[in-house]
Amino acid sequence: MFFPHTEADQKVMLETIGVKSIEELFKDIPQAYRFPDLRLPPPLTEMEAMGELQELAWANESARDLACFLGAGAYNHYVPAAVDMLLRRGEFYTAYTPYQPEISQGTLQSIFDYQSLIVALTGMEVSNASHYDGATAAAEAVTMADAHFRGKRTKFILSPSLHPHYRQTIHTYNHGNDIKLVGENIDLKSGPEALLSLIDADTALVMVQYPDFFGRIYDYTALAQAVHTAGALLAVAVNPLSLGLLKAPGDFGADIVVGEGQTLGIPLSFGGPYLGIFATRKEYVRKMAGRLVGESVDNRGQRAFVLTLTAREQHIRREKATSNICTNQGLIALASAIYMSLLGKQGMHQVAELCYHKAHYLAHQIAALPGYELWTDVPFFHEFAVRCPAPVEEINAHLMEHGILGGYDLGIEYPELKDHMLIAVTEMNSRQEIDALIDVLGEVSHE
Amino acid sequence: MNIPSDLKYTQNDEWVRVEGNVGTVGISDFAQNQLSDIVFVEVVVSVGETVKQGDTCATVESVKAAADVYMPVSGKILEVNDSLPATPESVNSDPYGAAWMVKVELSDPAELDKLLDASGYEKLIATKE
């Protein structure tokens, strides 16, 4: 039962702070905005309200109704029905790790399994119980590297082909923090070699994406060596699904792997909730943020799961903790664990391979269309950039008339890529959909 | 509670043993007892580094808490105890001996006057318990 403040409570509080009335607390807000007339429509019955909401819902076009070629960080993959079926069990239905954790062995086991799968997929040694999304996980990598060097190294190199939203989030997290974020303005066409000259003894972290924001696949082995020679750390932001096909970042020397886990069985659903993946090497575990579940034995010798290394976290370390965020996406992490378990190593390889081949078929066809040119000129996964003969916005409007959700307008984040479209292809795109896209793009080039 | 009389103490439960112009630094028996089983120690300064009184020189973590260790005096770090990461439990068993954390060349011996002697420290922890 919630008791609001009584009038007597309010009177005492107002007297304490020396204010006469509650209205006086709002005196800094201009009079005209203080109690505005909201001009709301008249109240509706539940039945009327449902009808109105249904009308609104029908006005939407979802990735389910359209042929979707939009990616740029969130992708339209098939989610097996079993994911939702298992996820919606009441026992799992919370976004939080419990605060008296060991009483919830099932929850802890599901997190432990998630961590184990992420470790296997990324080639790292430790995974936390997850963060909010790929962008916040990337920001935590910067925070962790800063904590690791205790502020003694101040330079953080971000690849310009790290997702623009991730970079914005990193800037937001570090506003007012005394570090330098560099590298974002180097030439987009250049590969990881262009980052090498920026690395020095003051460098704490280099962060790249794999495949990068434009879908490109680079071998970061030489970069990792240069980073380590300078005594710095390498963070790699991944699309975890691509790791079904690609070499794991742990195998080429990544110290931190972060990523957007949405591709692992999480629906697009208007941009969230998604899943922030964070994995690292064991030697950095005490600087890692987030919850961590470990396997132990109880006093009867039975396998048991515990929250471990909690002295890293804010409730113990207070302001000295690496991060003050220990919320994880428990339910979404579980969804991804179910997805990975259902598909298995072979299944994930197969999905990634399907995406790869379909994307390459499409890229090949678009390159042959007059007026279009592939911007991507190195190996890519399931996404590529194309220079278009007309503004992307116009082309996308035309595509929408044909029930096709076109690619991402790169000019929004990269002015030098005006009229460039980033196109993503997944296993969901049928041959018919792909051919339809090619036909409509062809019409645009003839207009 | 073991409070050796030949050491100087801080309000934050660090001790310093002065021999010539060299100070050896660690945490007190009272501190290790409060922290309980220590599972991790990390010395966060390196040899040659100049530190000021109050700077963090180490971090200790027990099964229930984490704490920073602050320099009781200013100076240049001469030596750090490399064996601590492998034997964090020595902070519990031998806080004034094997579990020393850093050795420092004192740059301002007058700072010692501001520290507590054994009886002063004993009075302080009586108020903490």
Image (spheres, coloured by chain):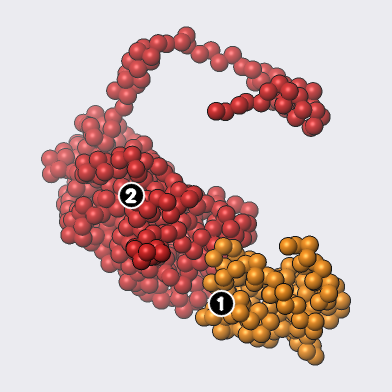
Question: Observer-nearest residue: A337 or A102?
Answer: A102
Residue A177 to residue A7: above or below: below
The residue drawn where x is 32% and y is 18% is A55
Which residue in the protein does label 2 denote?
A: A334
Left or right placement of residue A26 versus residue A383 in this view: right
The residue drawn where x is 17% and y is 53% is A354
Left or right placement of residue B80 versus residue A310 in this view: right
Q: Residues within 10 Å of mark 1 (few under 14, many from 20)?
A: many
Question: Observer-nearest residue: A105 or A363?
Answer: A105
Q: In which image quadrant can residue A54 be found?
A: top left
The secondary structure type at the circle numbered 2 is helix
Read off the chain for label 2: A
In the drawing, what numbered circle is on residue A17?
Answer: none
User: Taking the image as drawn, is residue A186 in sight?
Assistant: no
Chain displayed in red:
A
Q: Residue furthest top?
A: A42
The residue drawn where x is 81% and y is 77% is B118
Left or right placement of residue A226 versus residue A9 in this view: left
Chain displayed in orange:
B
Q: Please provide percent x and percent y for residue A167.
A: 47, 53
Left or right placement of residue A23 versus residue A376 in this view: right
Q: Amino acid at mark 1?
A: Pro
Which residue in the protein does label 1 denote?
A: B88
Q: Amino acid at mark 2?
A: Leu
